[in-house]
């Protein structure tokens, strides 16, 4: 199974967004053993000056169905 999460943001938000995204990826990997994850970035900004990033998560269906639910303690507001 694959899950892709896309988001756009302005370059001025880069340090905070990167930290939050990497923390979230680590939380998912710790909660669902067997998940692999990548943080991908488009090389250019769009016409609004925004970066586009994507979190890509991959695992087997068995891995996903046997995992415990993620907590609501997400650092993203």
Image: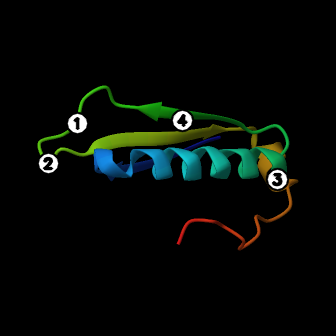
Q: Which residue is mark 2?
A: 48
What is the crowding at mark 1: few (fewer than 14 residues within 10 Å), some, or many (at least 20)? some
CA distance separating discs 1 and 3:
33 Å
The answer to whether 72 is drawn above or below residue 35 in the figure is below
First in residue order: circle 3 vs circle 4: 3
CA distance separating discs 3 and 4:
18 Å
- At numbered mark 1, what does the secondary structure look like: helix, strand or loop? loop
First in residue order: circle 4 vs circle 2: 4
First in residue order: circle 1 vs circle 3: 3
Label 2–label 1 contact, CB within 8 A: yes
Label 1–label 4 contact, CB within 8 A: no
Q: Is residue 71 left or right of residue 4?
A: right
Quadrant including the N terminus: top right
- At numbered mark 2, what does the secondary structure look like: helix, strand or loop? loop
Q: Which mark is residue 39?
A: 4
CA distance separating discs 4 and 2:
22 Å
The answer to whether 46 is drawn above or below residue 10 in the figure is above
Outermost residue, left direction? 47
Q: Which mark is residue 57?
A: none
């Amino acid at each position: 199974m694959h899950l892709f999460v896309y988001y756009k943001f302005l370059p001025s938000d880069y340090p905070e967004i990167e930290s939050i995204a990497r923390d979230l990826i680590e939380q998912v990997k710790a909660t669902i053993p067997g998940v692999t994850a990548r943080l991908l970035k488009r090389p250019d900004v769009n016409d609004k000056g925004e970066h586009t990033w994507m979190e890509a998560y991959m695992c087997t269906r068995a891995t996903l169905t046997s995992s415990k639910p993620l907590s609501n303690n997400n650092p993203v507001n």
